[in-house]
Image (spheres, helix red, strand yellow):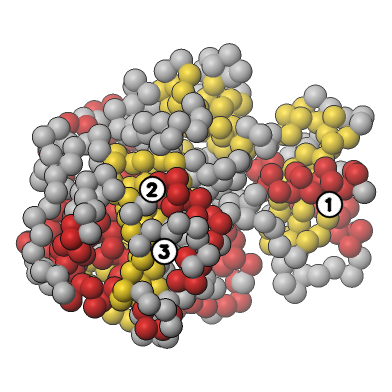
């Protein structure tokens, strides 16, 4: 069956018609997010499953929309009894578990704002976010509870398996049992927030992002056209809901479509990933590039000839190397496509599984319907084909653009009608773009501007390289030289490190350009990353500068 043409879908896109089609409520006169992602599906089919989940001890279970509706009502009643309601922040410091989904849904049912806390955060990161958001309640579990004891002025806490903490803290399930399973959803409008996010903080302090209810339309468009989530699909987004991609598109997005999602709280390994895909018959997979690189680096884990049944795969966070995409095609017999977005905006530039358009290896794709994405030069003029510019969103021409500015005015990213992403991209002239690096990641060496992602991608073509991080190192002659920090794949440790360095340098010279090769290469055991798997190049930059002072 022929796919719809991207150009016609993009040009004919009508946000008002979409809102009428997918929402029971109204962005103008009122809606409730929990109703949109849960109640209406529970009404249609009481047995319809919202969540399939694994447990840390090897067990598993499921939660229907009807069960989620009742449990969310109990939690909403508890919130109301504590005086927590519309606009108040409620935080979840929980692993991927049914309790996490109940907290999210119940918070939204009460008209309050859900605030994710990643379980790998230390007490300092938690304290900063709770204080900044004036959070009214934190829900956690016994494993994460000790972190909260170190948080200054911590808000009230309720805890899953509270008895295991040895502390006087209210138990989540006991609290819910005392509540009614009926709660009339609190209505909000499209401009009211329903999620309180924080940026990943790769540059400076994390900034607040309050996501308004109208973002539902943007989330839906991504799930429908980029992810291509179909009724018959079995969908697993590996990303943690402690961050934007997991919360937006492993929770809100699929449930908005009445589709079951999957949670696995166990550590990500090739073995656990394949076990999960086999057990549930996953057909539609979404994950960060780190996950796909890890699978490729451990190719031997998947028996030769085994076909897992994946229909499509999606990647977001960093560009996927062509070697990885080719490996996925060969070993998994499906297409993996790159998508681009931010905490602030959701996904705005994608290769679309559900639409027909040219799909170039290494490209982040085209503007998502409802958005107009451009690349700007230093004078904030849109660049031409083949030119590098800062990726930006034309706000007036983007009816689904849903970022209203940082919650506490930490920074002004708007200029001349554009939202500036801080990411650099190459414009191809046909409406598509390729990621080139963060604005502050771009390396200028001997007058040339080099995107680190290009060098990293080329290094990954070598069999011995598992990962690489490329940065500028100050240099008296050239202003900067390119330095690569390289992680060697297990089993490929070289007998002669200098010989391998020379091989890698020649590979980049050959595959990229003579001015883009790394003059210095250092082999390291791991790269610094954000919790969502992005390389923290600013740490590597600082390290490279410090080397000059030694």
Where residue 498 sits, quadrant-wise, is: bottom right
Side of 291 where 164 appears, left or right: left
How many circles with numbers are drawn on the protein? Answer: 3
Q: Looking at the image, which residue is at 41% across and 40% down? A: 209
Q: Residues within 10 Å of mark 3 (few under 14, many from 20)?
A: many
Between circles 3 and 1, the one closer to the viewer is: 3
Q: Looking at the image, which residue is at 46% across and 15% down? A: 416
**Any part of residue 411 in sight:** yes
Compute the Cα span from label 3 to label 1. 39 Å
Residue 79, image x, y percentages: 22, 59
Q: Which residue is mark 2?
A: 134
Q: Can you say whether 272 is above or below 347 in the image?
A: below
**Any part of residue 72 in sight:** no
**Mark nearer the N terminus (3 vs 1):** 3
Side of 530 where 412 appears, left or right: left
Q: Which residue is mark 1?
A: 521
Q: Looking at the image, which residue is at 58% across and 14% down? A: 379
**Mark nearer the N terminus (2 vs 3):** 3
Q: Nearer the viewer, residue 2 or 447?
A: 447
* Tag 2 secondary structure: loop
Between circles 1 and 2, the one closer to the viewer is: 2
Given contact means CB atoms under 8 Å apart, are the residues at marks 1 and 2 in contact?
no
Compute the Cα span from label 2 to label 3. 16 Å
Given contact means CB atoms under 8 Å apart, are the residues at marks 2 and 3 in contact?
no
* Tag 3 secondary structure: strand
**Mark nearer the N terminus (1 vs 2):** 2
Q: Nearer the viewer, residue 51 or 223?
A: 51
Residue 131, image x, y percentages: 45, 49
Q: Which residue is mark 3?
A: 93
């Amino acid at each position: 069956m022929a796919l719809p043409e991207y150009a016609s879908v993009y040009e004919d896109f009508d946000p008002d018609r979409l809102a009428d089609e997918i929402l029971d409520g109204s962005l103008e006169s009122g809606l409730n997010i929990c109703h949109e992602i849960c109640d209406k599906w529970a009404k249609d089919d009481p047995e319809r499953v919202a969540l399939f989940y694994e447990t840390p001890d090897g067990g598993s279970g499921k939660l229907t929309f009807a069960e989620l509706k009742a449990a969310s009502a109990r939690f909403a009643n508890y919130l109301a009894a504590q005086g927590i309601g519309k606009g108040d922040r409620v935080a979840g410091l929980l692993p991927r578990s049914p309790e996490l989904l109940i907290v999210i849904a119940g918070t939204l049912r009460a008209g309050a704002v859900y605030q994710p806390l990643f379980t790998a955060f230390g007490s300092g990161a938690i304290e900063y976010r709770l204080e900044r958001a004036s959070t009214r309640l934190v829900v956690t579990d016994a494993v994460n509870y000790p972190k909260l004891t170190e948080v200054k002025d911590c808000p009230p806490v309720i805890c899953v398996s509270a008895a295991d903490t040895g502390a006087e803290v209210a138990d989540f399930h006991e609290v819910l049992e005392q509540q009614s399973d009926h709660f009339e959803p609190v209505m909000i409008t499209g401009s009211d927030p329903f999620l309180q996010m924080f940026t990943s903080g790769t540059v400076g302090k994390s900034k607040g992002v309050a996501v308004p209810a109208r973002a539902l339309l943007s989330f839906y468009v991504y799930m429908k056209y980029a992810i291509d989530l179909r009724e018959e699909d079995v969908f697993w987004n590996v990303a943690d809901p402690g961050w934007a991609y997991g919360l937006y598109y492993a929770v809100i997005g699929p449930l908005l479509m009445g589709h079951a999602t999957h949670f696995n709280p166990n550590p990500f390994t090739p073995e656990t990933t394949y076990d999960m895909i086999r057990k549930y018959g996953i057909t539609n997979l979404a994950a960060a590039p780190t996950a796909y690189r890890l699978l490729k680096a451990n190719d031997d884990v998947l028996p030769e000839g085994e076909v897992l049944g994946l229909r499509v795969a999606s990647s977001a966070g960093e560009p996927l190397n062509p070697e990885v995409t080719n490996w996925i095609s060969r070993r998994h017999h499906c297409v993996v496509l790159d998508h681009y977005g931010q905490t602030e905006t959701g996904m705005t530039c994608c290769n679309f599984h559900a639409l027909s358009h040219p799909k170039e290896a290494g490209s982040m794709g085209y503007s998502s319907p409802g958005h107009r994405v451009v690349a700007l030069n230093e004078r904030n003029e849109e660049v031409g084909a083949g030119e590098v510019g800062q990726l930006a969103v034309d706000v007036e021409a983007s009816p689904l653009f849903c970022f209203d500015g940082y919650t506490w005015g930490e920074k002004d990213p708007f200029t001349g009608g554009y939202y500036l992403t801080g990411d650099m991209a190459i414009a191809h002239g046909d409406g598509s773009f390729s990621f080139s690096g963060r604005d502050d990641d771009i390396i200028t060496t001997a007058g040339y501007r080099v995107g680190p992602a290009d060098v990293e991608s080329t290094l990954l073509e070598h069999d011995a390289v598992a990962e690489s991080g490329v940065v500028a190192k100050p240099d008296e002659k050239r202003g900067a030289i390119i330095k690569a920090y390289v992680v060697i794949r297990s089993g490929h440790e070289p007998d002669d490190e200098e010989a391998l360095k020379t091989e890698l340098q020649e590979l980049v010279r050959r595959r990229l350009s003579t001015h883009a090769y790394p003059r210095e290469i250092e082999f390291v055991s791991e790269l610094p990353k954000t919790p969502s798997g992005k390389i923290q190049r600013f740490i590597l930059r600082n390290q490279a500068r410090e080397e000059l002072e030694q």
